Image (cartoon, rainbow, N blue to C red):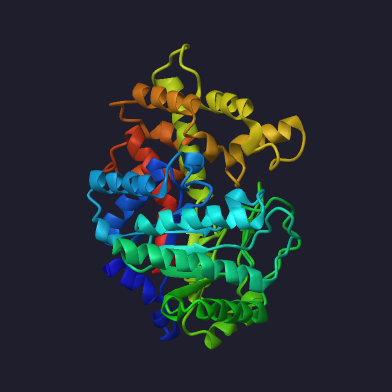
Amino acid sequence: MSAALENMLRIPARRHAGKRCGITSICSAHPLVIEAALLHGKTHNRDVLIEATCNQVNQDGGYTGMTPTGFRHFVEDIAEKVGFPVDRLILGGDHLGPNPWKHLAPDEAMRKASVMMDAFASAGFTKIHLDTSMACAGELAGLADQIIASRAADLARIAEVAVERTGGEKPVYIIGTEVPIPGGALEALDHLHVTTPESALKTVDIHRAAFAKLGLNEAFSRAIGVVVQPGVEFGNADVVAYKPENARELVAALDDMPQFVFEAHSTDYQSVEALKALVGDGFAILKVGPWLTFALREALYGLSHIADILVPDPARESLPSAMERAMLALPGNWQNYYPGSVAEQRIQRHFSFSDRIRYYWPSHIAQDATSALMTALEGVDIPRPLISQYLGHLDSTVADGSFKTSAHNLLIASITRVLDIYAEATH
């Protein structure tokens, strides 16, 4: 077992022994985000956990076009480029279940999910989030917990068989029936509820029983996390901050489940104080995704303005203009998520905390525009006054003059600023 995976397995024991510890889960497939995360891990001598969701990466390619094996090669190539040791890398599969195929009948959706699970486990993903909480075609919303647990155990069995066949490392599992929507809330945040302690304890009990029914007791001993709602969320323009007093009863339930810590989704845009409180209370696995690509977009848009000043070229389309074209050409990734007037939707397309613009960075329009921008700024040391004007959040980073202010370095620095917040919170 790699030291990184062993460290993760020990998180619950360390937490229950009174030690404050946690890990950041990087949920992004953007190469610059992954580069920044691996550079950050290398600089601070820390393990790095990178997760791919079932919609991003699956046997059909997902919206990234990558299979689990392809994603692994993609990340490891970046690790080699930046000199990050792969034995400090943990790859996770997030929301693994029938979600991409929930429009199909349950049996067919689970068959597809089983193929996906085999692909993830065979590719060496060692943190598996089992998420079978969604109803499939013909089923009523709000599946019974027993059905969710039974389907989760079926998928765990697929993973165990795949690892046995390939000789890979046995994975750790994350369970949970109260799973927040990936990528932020779709509605008003005035009725957010914290998971009840009874629900969290029941989740563990029914999953333990479902695993035992399939003879997977040893596999269940590697289940370390329960996904719950601690009372944090973000929407297009709102962030619900963590309030420890609202989660006090839920946190107390961890005393009755020493095998586990909690995994918190949608922790993006929380303050460092809130994130520290989450980790201290036992929400030891903090997932972050949109905030990282939001920070990347901030820097790219700032650089676009800077390029117009330093290297003006009427033939070069601004990056915001190119991204607007890309999003209007294929509106499926935003139009059902951004309400309001035409003007309000335009603002949200570019600046929403939900950051659904992240789905468009792999497009040809975005790739061509980003490449033209970076080519224009290649070899240019960007003056601090322009950084102050258009990348003000990075002014302190460049203040002492030791930072080479290239466009690429500034992009990495913008992402790293978020990673630093999570590093402070988890250690």
Front residue of 376/259: it is 259
Whole-percent x and y of residue 56? Answer: 50, 46
Position of residue 189 relative to residue 361, above or below, is below
x 31%, y 26%: residue: 378
x 67%, y 53%: residue: 105
x 44%, y 23%: residue: 368
82 horizontally vs 258: left or right: left
Res 412 seen here:
yes
Front residue of 348/135: it is 135
Residue 29 in which image quadrant: top left
* Quarter of the N terminus within the rendering: bottom left
* Quarter of the C terminus within the rendering: bottom left
Front residue of 160/4: it is 160
Res 424 seen here:
no
Whole-percent x and y of residue 424? Answer: 41, 64
Position of residue 173 relative to residue 25, above or below, is below
349 horizontally vs 75: left or right: right
Residue 182 in which image quadrant: bottom right
x 59%, y 41%: residue: 356
Front residue of 301/180: it is 180
Whole-percent x and y of residue 274? Answer: 54, 66
Residue 160 in which image quadrant: bottom left
Whole-percent x and y of residue 297? Answer: 49, 38
